[in-house]
Amino acid sequence: MQSDNPTAAILVIGDEILSGRTREGNAHHLAQVLSATGFDLREIRVVADDEDQIVAAVRALDSSLGGAFDLLFTSGGIGPTHDDITADAVAAAHGTVAEVDPEARAILQARCDRMGTELTPNRLRMARIPVGARLIDNAVSAAPGFSIGNTHVMAGVPEVFRGMVDWLIPRLAAGRPVQSQTVEVRRGESEVAEELKAVAAEFPDLSLGSYPYHDERGWGTNLVVRGLDAARVGVAMDALKRRLSL
Amino acid sequence: MQSDNPTAAILVIGDEILSGRTREGNAHHLAQVLSATGFDLREIRVVADDEDQIVAAVRALDSSLGGAFDLLFTSGGIGPTHDDITADAVAAAHGTVAEVDPEARAILQARCDRMGTELTPNRLRMARIPVGARLIDNAVSAAPGFSIGNTHVMAGVPEVFRGMVDWLIPRLAAGRPVQSQTVEVRRGESEVAEELKAVAAEFPDLSLGSYPYHDERGWGTNLVVRGLDAARVGVAMDALKRRLSL
């Protein structure tokens, strides 16, 4: 698909995904938001709670560090426990260190005051922010995310992650939302490959995909046309349906 | 966690994941199988149906090409349509080309004969295998996957992927399965961080993780101890419960 939308990557940080304990869902949620907003998601990576792996991934993916994509979003590893090392690792990747941030500390203190709890050393860990970063609001549980360079660091708990996405994305300079149309056929992919290829060749500016599935009735395929211009997507879908006699 | 289990990565290939259309599930399934079998999954990547991205990822991840991990498993892009380019891209990464493989062709021909259909040029695309690769059996829909170097290429349709995993994994030299124990507490992570850190320091050969969640009753945390020795995992879990007065 031809697009000059800003490009993006997602880095998910967490042993629990790699061990199979948790099925990742934050990347899927953000992928939908990015498509609908006008960012072109090009890669998702999942790495362990391991400083070397995180640093290498941030450098490979954040264009401000010579990496491949305009924007990098991360999920996970900013909680209060010993294995929450994302702030330190992202700081290291950006050539700085994480320190207790006065604004973040005030946010956590205010929450503790409201809840009638203490700002313990463990809770204070969540105010450790790379020097030079801007905070990302956390409407659910106060402890903020942060942005440094083109890296946007968010929490792993799905409810908190979604809140941060809702706050952050409207503040970024987006391109044009992706338009898509889907048609479902009860045929295998092989039976539509010819027609799909012909329409793809006719509309090189659009993306045409086929997504087969198998259920109790046998094979079916979803055919999807995607592009930045809704009218053009419609013309291509009409052409595809004509070729498939739908 | 100390482990000399073989290391592994998963590469998921497919625009539909990055566009947010499809929530990826194959990597989660394989992550569970690898943990239970004795492989140490270290990274998951999702890239587009893009030859350059696939080639770069295969080279970065497959140790036989100087990449980071002992084994690489891929999912997606081996169907019959124009955007199924995984066989060609993996071949290119391994310095060879994909050609119609006689054994794969015979498998597809036999299936077409059984189904009373033709082995059309589109279907024959699914017999294109990198020269020098070994086939991976497909019990669901015949069209095989393949292994080349340390890269194991499987289909994206979940039912087919699972069948290929079931066939392939027992044929690989595994290490020791991961043992794990979990305890759930109705407290936030901050309230268990101290105890968790102390036990983690006492058992440096194990992995201790905390996975917070938020529901209608407020915050809770799952505490997980993982390691290769079940007795040692049990000892660490007992120590953790003692510290938490559970």
Image (cartoon, coloured by chain):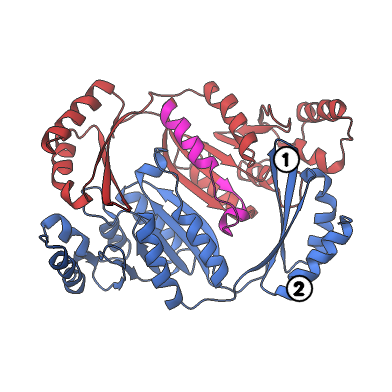
Chain colours: A red, B blue
Report the mark closest to the observer, 1 or 2: 2
Q: Which quarter of the image is occupied by the N terminus of chain B? A: bottom right
SS label for mark 2: helix
SS label for mark 1: strand
Residue B19, image quadrant = top left
Mark count = 2
Residue B72, image quadrant = bottom left
Give the residue number, with chain letter if any, for mark 1.
Answer: A98
Task: Residue type at mark 2: give it.
Answer: Arg
**Chain part drawn in magenta:** A12-36
Q: A146 left or right of A245?
A: right
Q: Is residue A92 above or below residue B89?
A: above
Circle 2 Cα neighbour tier, 10 Å, few/some/many (<14 / 14–19 / ≥20): some
Q: Which quarter of the image is occupied by the C terminus of chain B? A: bottom right
**Closer to the camera in the image, A240 or A119:** A240
Question: Label for residue A14?
Answer: none
Query: Magenta span has A13?
Result: yes
